[in-house]
Image (tube, rainbow, N blue to C red):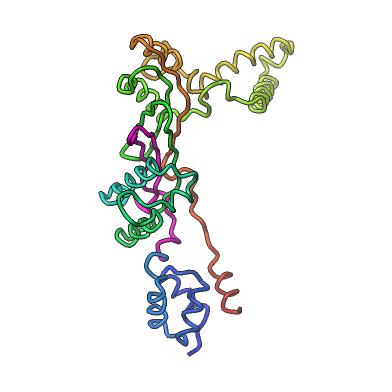
Amino acid sequence: MAFTATDVKNLREMTGVGMMDCKKALVATDGDMDKAVEWLREKGMAASVKKAGRIAAEGMAYAAVIDGVGVVVEVNAETDFVGKNEKFVDFVKGVAATAAKENPADLDALMACKYNGTDLTVTQQQQEMVLVIGENIKVRRFARYAEGVSVPYVHAGGKIGVLVNLETDLDAEKVQEAGKDVAMQIAALNPRFWDKSQVTQEVLDEEKKVMMAQMENDPKMAGKPEQVREKIVMGKLNKFYAENCLLQQEFVKDGDMTVEKYLASAAKALGGSITFKTAVRFEKGEGIEKKQENFADEIASLVKG
């Protein structure tokens, strides 16, 4: 039985399997659609592969400290509803526990680790979750800190996960409040840099260029001597630091001090030292774009082949 480009397209839409495999299935079954679906299922393609092609931009960002190790992960699903599913949340927490325990070098290494408490790899457990929940699920990224004291914060039930890493001579329990305050600030304001020392000369030059151009286009400023404009720019750069650098930002809970001064004040009150080292902020779905596929061209090229 012959088959057409439309048959390939229909089989793809029915099963979610790739074009080439759909074409193979129709060739193997003489164009019989029902048998082609059965062929793909027997090959193990039509269950989880169907979901794998769909965009997963929802899900959950999660942060925790597990056995003294700080970890933050993002796991994506297709719908916000699944992101709140108890089994999905448990899976996310299991991924975090695996990352904390196994210390994988990167995402590929994490996916190859034994999923916490099972004999399955994280990849295999992810595939199991796809079949159980019925949506594409994808472990996207993680970070972990074994050194220092980490403080986790999860905002809005998993929309944002933040992990703050501190260096301190105080007991970990004592710095939790200060660490959480900083984590909440990071979640809310998403600073571009942690400290002004991280701002590169390239970034500063670009900011100066923009500010100078703005003044040249301002009738009140255009006539001022260049050295005066330079001085104004330097003042504006301090504002740039205050807006873009965490430690130089105005502390949200007390506008009379910066985050840096807040940490110093909290440390003094506790009788020790607290130094902000680094942090990670994951917002679920950030940077994920839904792709557009040109089915007509793809089908035509495959059927001709």
Any magenta on residue 294? no
**Across the whole image, how many numbered discs are drawn on residues?**
0
Residue 170 horizontal/vertical position (percent): 36, 17
Between 242 and 134, the one lying in front of the other is 134
Residue 53 horizontal/vertical position (percent): 45, 61
Residue 266 horizontal/vertical position (percent): 36, 13
Residue 23 horizontal/vertical position (percent): 51, 78
Residue at 64%, 16% in the rendered image? 233
Residue at 66%, 14% in the rendered image? 220
142 vs 22: above or below: above
Between 229 and 98, the one lying in front of the other is 98
Residue range highlighted in magenta: 50-79
| Residue 239 figure quarter | top right
Any magenta on residue 72? yes
Between 24 and 115, the one lying in front of the other is 115
| Residue 78 figure quarter | bottom left
Quarter holding the C terminus is: bottom right
